[in-house]
Amino acid sequence: MSNSLTAFSSANLPSVQSLSASLRSLQTGSASGGSIILKMDKTGHWVFGADQTEVEDDSRWAINPFSFVHGYIAWGNGEVLGENMTNISNPLPELEPAPSGAAKGWEKQVGLSIKCMSGEDAGMEARFSATSVGGKKAVQELAVAIAAQVDADPTRPVPVVELSNEHYQHKQYGKIFAPIFNIVDWANMEGETTPQPLEDVAEDEAPADEAPRTRRRRRVA
């Protein structure tokens, strides 16, 4: 993997060794960087941006282990009325009364920053946030996995993931989809992943006459 695709800025970051306790706090405790919003829509597709562009199949993404945040968000009529987020190394922020018009008041939210490593979106950074039970569970499980990795090998704290989903049947709302971050590798902060054995590289090489990959379809927002 190219270093330029996955390297995260190390400026003003705490030590990798300080990650573990903070990340584990999401397991029982519970604004990320990146201006592009990555989310899972109601049909189980991962999409990003204002035009709801679908994520490429089999694309790989790097999670910035220092980007985990928690806090609160207030929604009203499909728009954000207020948001108060902080790094997970800090206590949950104190809140004023919820903004007028907030349908559910303040809702607890977790989030992180993610960077595409492969395909036509390589190098793009995005923000993923979740208030749903399934979304928060996915972020919490990812945080705990990073904490365990940091304890075992602090030199490679960056999870490389493929984006997937799971679903269950709700009595009132029907099929409900939830995000999954499938960890397929670990990288250091410079983007260097685990070296791949030569025999695996040979098996992964596509035949010369393989048809070009079809461009993903665009979704209407």
Image: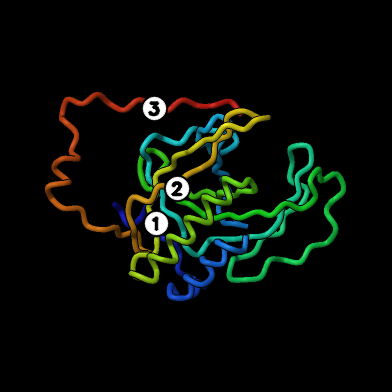
Label 3, label 2: how many angstroms apart (C-alpha)?
Answer: 23 Å
Q: How many marks?
A: 3
Label 3, label 1: how many angstroms apart (C-alpha)?
Answer: 26 Å
Residue 132 sits above or below residue 190 on the image? above
Question: Considering depth in this image, is 43 or 4 the residue closer to the camera?
Answer: 43
Indicate which disc, 3 or 1, sits on the residue closer to the N terminus. Answer: 1
Report the residue at 80% width, 50% height from top.
105
Where disc 1 sits, the SS reads strand
> Do callouts 1 and 2 mark residues in contact (Cβ within 8 Å)?
yes
Hey, what amino acid is under mark 3? Arg
Where disc 2 sits, the SS reads strand
Q: In the image, is 97 to the left or to the right of 36? A: right
Indicate which disc, 1 or 2, sits on the residue closer to the N terminus. Answer: 1
Indicate which disc, 3 or 2, sits on the residue closer to the N terminus. Answer: 2
Hey, what amino acid is under mark 1? Pro
Question: Considering depth in this image, is 15 or 152 the residue closer to the camera?
Answer: 152
Question: Closer to the observer: label 3 or label 2?
Answer: 2
Residue 110 percent location from the top left of the image: 61, 55
Residue 174 percent location from the top left of the image: 61, 28
Residue 67 percent location from the top left of the image: 53, 61
Q: In the image, is 5 to the left or to the right of 23? A: left
Name the disc covering residue 159, or none: 1
Name the disc covering residue 215, or none: 3
Question: Considering depth in this image, is 140 or 4 the residue closer to the camera?
Answer: 140
**Among all residues in the image, which is located at the extreme right?**
100
User: Circle 2 sits on which residue?
Assistant: 181
Question: Considering depth in this image, is 61 or 183 the residue closer to the camera?
Answer: 183
Hey, what amino acid is under mark 2? Phe
- Quadrant in the rendering for residue 101: top right
Report the residue at 46% width, 59% height from top.
64
